[in-house]
């Protein structure tokens, strides 16, 4: 039964992330990361699909392995927040428009303070997962399906 709730949560998060592509204040990548988290507990096939997705897979792996957001992702998020605030200031009455300003400031600050994706070295680990001869090679992280087993 719990698996069905995670599957429903993953589908809902994926749908909200997809809508977020078109709505600036609704974030896309965090919902995709949440969807991958839920799919890890409900559907290994969907989780693997998310991890290998050509657009979102890198962001999901960077968050999962490093807790990091790319500089480009940070700039895109800040730009989307700024656009949303400008729209809200024009379309919403004064006291209520401050809600979007506050949400943008808090959300933008949180995103900007996340670590950035480590840059890959010439022959070292890549940003989307441990590889190479370093300590990660001896103790690789658990596979995506094993990371969230109950």
Image (cartoon, rainbow, N blue to C red):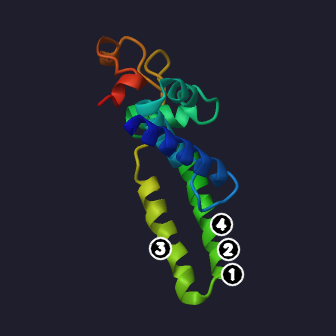
Cα separation between marks 4 and 1: 11 Å
Looking at marks 3 and 2 on the same chain, the residue that comes earlier in the sequence is marked by 2
**Dot label at residue 108:** none
In the image, is 113 to the left or to the right of 94?
left
Q: How many marks?
A: 4
The correct choice, above or below, for 21 with respect to 104 in the image is above
- At 66% from the left and 53% from the top, the residue drawn is 19
Whether residue 4 is visible, yes or no, is: yes
Residue picked out by circle 3 = 102
Image marks 1 and 3: residues in contact by CB distance under 8 Å: no
x and y percent of residue 6 in the render? 44, 40
Label 2 near label 1: C-beta < 8 Å?
yes
Q: Which mark is residue 83?
A: 4
The location of residue 58, given as percent across then percent down, is 55, 32
Tell me the number on the disc at residue 90.
1
Q: Are marks 2 and 4 in contact (CB under 8 Å)?
A: yes
Residue name at image x 70 percent, y 55 percent: 22
Q: Is residue 69 visible?
A: no
């Amino acid at each position: 039964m719990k698996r069905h709730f995670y599957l429903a949560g993953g589908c809902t998060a994926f749908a909200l992330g997809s809508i977020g592509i078109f709505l600036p204040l609704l974030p896309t990548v965090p919902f995709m990361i949440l969807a991958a988290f839920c799919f890890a507990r409900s559907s290994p096939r969907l989780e693997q699909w998310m991890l290998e997705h050509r657009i979102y897979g890198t962001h999901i792996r960077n968050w999962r392995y490093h807790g990091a957001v790319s500089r480009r992702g940070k700039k895109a998020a800040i730009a989307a927040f700024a656009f949303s605030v400008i729209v809200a200031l024009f379309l919403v009455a004064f006291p209520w428009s401050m809600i979007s300003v506050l949400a943008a400031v808090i959300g933008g600050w949180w995103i900007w303070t996340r670590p950035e994706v480590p840059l890959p070295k010439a022959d070292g680990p890549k940003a989307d997962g441990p590889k190479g001869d370093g300590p990660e090679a001896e103790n690789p992280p658990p596979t995506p399906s094993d990371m969230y087993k109950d």
